């Protein structure tokens, strides 16, 4: 009887510990991993520090440590170790797939093109002072090359006219027209859908 009772107590303790472990896991991670186009929680919670963020319009030397898609990267300023998320100003790239929703054609190609241009490089990041979903809106240049405009020129992003300043819209729209006429990148498609229309039609998150 003593052995059976001891065994029963042991099993109860094991079950209890398993329940506790499951509750801890669910509390921290949720019921399933949440893969979103927007930024992972650990990156999203990085504090914005005044000593890292110079005033809007002031170039910041930084290294690109991650590329999420054709218009969003994570950069690490050389003056500190605090990374922040950069949404490229004036452009909109095809939506990438997430766990629950299928993305657009050429989303992967757009991501790969931006990776070729900036991943691992030291670049100049100029914030505009605006933000979107905890992302700083930025202009990025690498050795004098305007990366935002270059993505449009190569046909891997749209000119996001709605958010372009008047003085910039002409260059970006001209680049978009030239890329479409040359059938570059996403313009190889017969009738590519603008990402903002795709998001609205699919309630893409």
Image (tube, helix red, strand yellow):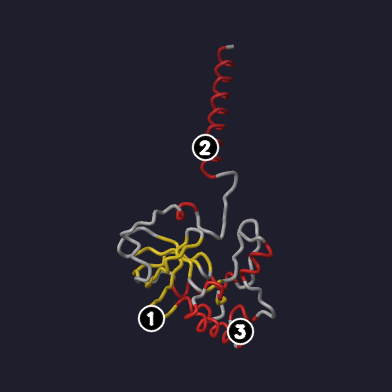
Q: Which mark is residue 144?
A: 1
Can you identify the residue that label 2 sits on? 24
Q: What percent of the width, then of the height, locates residue 35?
A: 57, 55
Which residue is located at x 34 percent, y 69 percent? 60
Query: Residue 89, image x and y in percent?
Result: 48, 71
Q: Secondary structure at mark 1?
A: loop
Q: Residue at x 35, y 66 (%)?
A: 55
Q: Are marks 1 and 2 in contact (CB under 8 Å)?
A: no
Q: Residues within 10 Å of mark 3 (few under 14, many from 20)?
A: many
Whole-angstrom CA distance, mark 3 to mark 1, is 25 Å
Q: Is residue 89 visible?
A: yes
- When the figure is inspected, residue 3 is found, relative to residue 69, above or below; the finding is above
Q: Is residue 157 visible?
A: no
Which quadrant would residue 157 be assigned to in this image? Answer: bottom right
Q: Quadrant of the C terminus?
A: bottom right
The image shows residue 59 at horizontal and vertical percentages of: 35, 71
Dot 1 or dot 2: first in sequence order is 2
Q: Which mark is residue 180?
A: 3
């Amino acid at each position: 009887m003593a052995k059976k009772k001891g065994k029963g107590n042991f099993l109860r303790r094991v079950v209890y510990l398993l329940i506790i472990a499951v509750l801890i896991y669910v509390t921290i991670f949720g019921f399933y991993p949440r893969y979103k186009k927007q930024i992972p929680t650990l990156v999203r919670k990085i504090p914005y520090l005044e000593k890292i963020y110079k005033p809007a319009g002031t170039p910041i030397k930084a290294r690109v440590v991650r590329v999420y898609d054709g218009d969003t990267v994570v950069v690490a300023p050389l003056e500190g170790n605090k990374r922040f998320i950069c949404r490229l100003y004036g452009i909109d790239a095809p939506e990438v797939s997430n766990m629950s929703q299928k993305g657009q054609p050429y989303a992967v190609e757009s991501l790969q093109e931006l990776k070729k241009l900036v991943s691992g490089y030291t670049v100049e990041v100029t914030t505009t002072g605006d933000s979107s979903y905890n992302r700083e809106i930025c202009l990025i240049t690498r050795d004098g090359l305007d990366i935002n405009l270059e993505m449009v020129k190569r046909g891997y992003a749209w000119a996001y006219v709605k958010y372009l300043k008047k003085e910039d819209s002409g260059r970006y729209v001209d680049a978009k027209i030239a890329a479409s006429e040359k059938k570059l990148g996403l313009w190889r498609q017969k009738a590519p859908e603008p990402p903002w229309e795709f998001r609205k039609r699919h309630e893409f998150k």
